[in-house]
Image: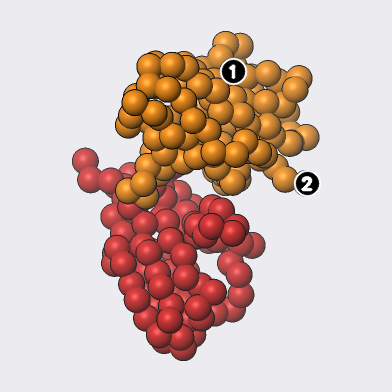
Amino acid sequence: DAGVIQSPRHEVTEMGQEVTLRCKPISGHDYLFWYRQTMMRGLELLIYFNNNVPIDDSGMPEDRFSAKMPNASFSTLKIQPSEPRDSAVYFCASSLPSRGQSIYNEQFFGPGTRLTVL
Amino acid sequence: AQKITQTQPGMFVQEKEAVTLDCTYDTSDPSYGLFWYKQPSSGEMIFLIYQGSYDQQNATEGRYSLNFQKARKSANLVISASQLGDSAMYFCAMREGPSGANSKLTFGKGITLSVRP
């Protein structure tokens, strides 16, 4: 079974440009999470979805960031306009349904997208 | 206050020896779960072990075990018989509330472990 798939793996862009990161969760997982990892702030949860509905977006840094999940197999994280301080590794993760199918509800992470904004 | 605290500086261990990575947590919720993840230099996040707040026994998973001290709010990861491939960053994380109600994880800053041959 394929794991969480993220694209692109690396993205280099110039300040002011729009950036779109993509994620395909593991089939059957109904939770999807977007994280950002930097040296300064560590691993931060940006937003998470349950059954394609955003549940908690309190970690989204500002209006320049937006996330969507149009269906169970696809999500996007968009930054518009991008700034150098957005440079980070962005992870997508997914987990099983929360009732009865997983004791742990551990999150399975994708390989991440390394974003560099010049 | 930080929910998850990992304060050790970079850790070093000799190959084949055991090592303990510290994690303390802060929550007022009686139901919670604690997780450890490994992040090697390649960058992926790998789930290692889980401990539930109501679990009577310490979790074990192969060479990984979790020293869970509820009263002290600590959940230290013990790696036995270290291998060179264990060199990585290790993250402790917590889910507050029962698993059916909340899936959000809060991560600590991580600890770097280097295994010496």
Which part of the image, by quadrant, shows the C terminus of chain B?
A: top left
For chain A, give the colour.
red
Q: Position of residue A111 (x, y in %)?
A: 33, 52
The circle on residue B67 is: 1
Q: Looking at numbered disc 1 in the image, what kind of residue is underneath it?
A: Asn
Instruction: Please state the horizontal and vertical placement of residue B86, each as a whole percent of the image.
Output: 38, 30
Camera-nearest residue between B61 and B83: B83
Residue found at the very far top of the displayed protein: B57
Q: In the picture, one chain is orange; tell me its letter.
A: B
| Dot 1: chain letter | B
Chain of the residue under the numbered disc 2 shown in the image = B
In the displayed orientation, state which residue is furthest to the bottom. Answer: A16
Residue B19, percent from left and from top: 50, 21
- SS for tag 1? strand
Front-most of residues B19 and A92: B19
Which residue is at 40% across, 85% downward?
A14
Residue at the (70%, 20%) spot, across then down: B70
